[in-house]
Amino acid sequence: MTLYILKHAMVGAALASICACSLNAPKYTPVPSNVNALRDANLGQAKVGSFSADPKASTDVNRLSIRGTSYVSPYNESYVDYLKEALRLELDEARVMNSGATVELSGVLIRNELDTGMTSAHALIEARFIVKRGDQIRYDKVKTAKYEWESHFVGAIAIPRSQENYPVVVQKLLTSLYSDPDFLAAFKN
Amino acid sequence: MQLRLSLSAVLATALLVGCAHPIVITPDVSQIDRTEVKPIECNVGYFISQPDREKEVTTPGGGGDKVRYFPYKELEPALFKALSNVFRRAYPMNSALDAEAIKTKDITFVFVPEVTTDSSSSSAFTWPPTKFTVNLNCKAFNREGKQIWESKITGNGEATFSEFKSDLPLAAKRASLKAMQDFQKALNTAPELRTK
């Protein structure tokens, strides 16, 4: 009985120690369908410009947590940089990236939320994307994406599930951007 | 009172150590780079069946727990990246012999992967695996459906508690990355894929 209690106390302590540390968000993974959508559009070359946080945002878009544990972006601990890197990775994989291009894509992260409830969880992201050719603004729109998944009241199940599901909302945001004909047209001469 | 305590202990134990924890085994695909690739100028397809894409696998973790994940769905971005790095374009296909896709997308080869995995843990007290293995057996077929190439690759990954405490599936991600990097090397050096 003593051994039984000891073993499970140690399991609890180990789990608590896992949860006591900050959690890293997974690095962004380009989605094949997103990359092929960009390549199929035969876009011209483009570069990624500056991305920033909306100064009017009601919450700090660079700070997320899962059940009270800090959930940190792997890109300079910034979710603004997470979005910028996600876009850069997909443009690079689609062979669109060129640091010398005259077309520049920039953005503002307006909302970034992650809620891990007892039965369901969701992430919500909203960003403004701007495409410029020189000084001329070719595209300026706000896109929003939401992704929901099943959660659990046990943190040991719910926390890793949220940890791995956040990137999906970023993928969905970019999917909605690439499926906008105005966005694709902004890259063309 | 003692019965209630015992039942609570059993329930807590079941919750803490009896479950299969969901993990994602997708590696950091930015580490599958194309700097050393000699490109092959043709389009390719890859076929992952819908049952495979939806297939969830459960393998051992630590402390008597298990981990569960979707190997095909979660390795697809890395497979796509390796194929895209070597070939001009890579397309997902609805079947290995999708004649219409082969024609419209000018596909020269179709790759069909088979993935098996295993995991284990040296820890009795934490559930994330400390060792993970990804076996990737991939066959390539030409337009006529004839097999022209095959590679059998094993990727192993390990992670200690201090490494995985902020990235729980780290051993799995390392194994996946190694398998896909070796897969790209195998594509890059296969003479069969350079003769259309």
Image (cartoon, coloured by chain):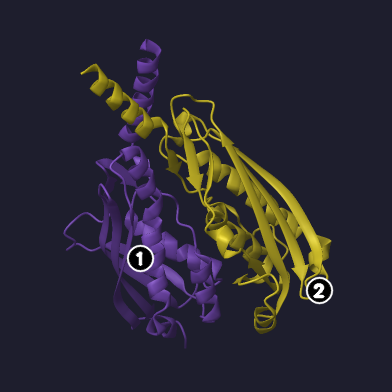
Chain colours: A purple, B yellow
Q: Which mark is residue B196?
A: 2
Q: Secondary structure at mark 1?
A: strand
Question: Dividing the picture into quarters, in which one does residue B111 lie?
Answer: bottom right
Task: Give the number of the disc on residue A50.
Answer: 1
Image coordinates for residue B152, horizontal then vertical, percent: 74, 50
Q: Which picture quadrant has residue A152? A: top left
Badge 2 element: loop
Write down the chain letter for disc 2.
B
Q: Residue at x 65, y 58 (%)?
A: B35
* Quadrant including the N terminus of chain A: top left
The answer for which chain carries disc 1 is A
Q: Name the amino acid type tagged 1.
A: Ser
Instruction: Decide if residue A99 is in sight here.
Output: no
Pick the front one: A33 or B53: B53
Q: Position of residue A117 (x, y in %)?
A: 25, 49
A157 sits to left or right of B57: left
* Residue nearest the viewer, comparing A180 with A104: A180
Instruction: Name which residue type carries label 2.
Output: Lys
In the visual, does A24 lie left or right of B56? left
Instruction: In the rendered view, tell whether residue B184 sits above or below residue B23.
Output: below
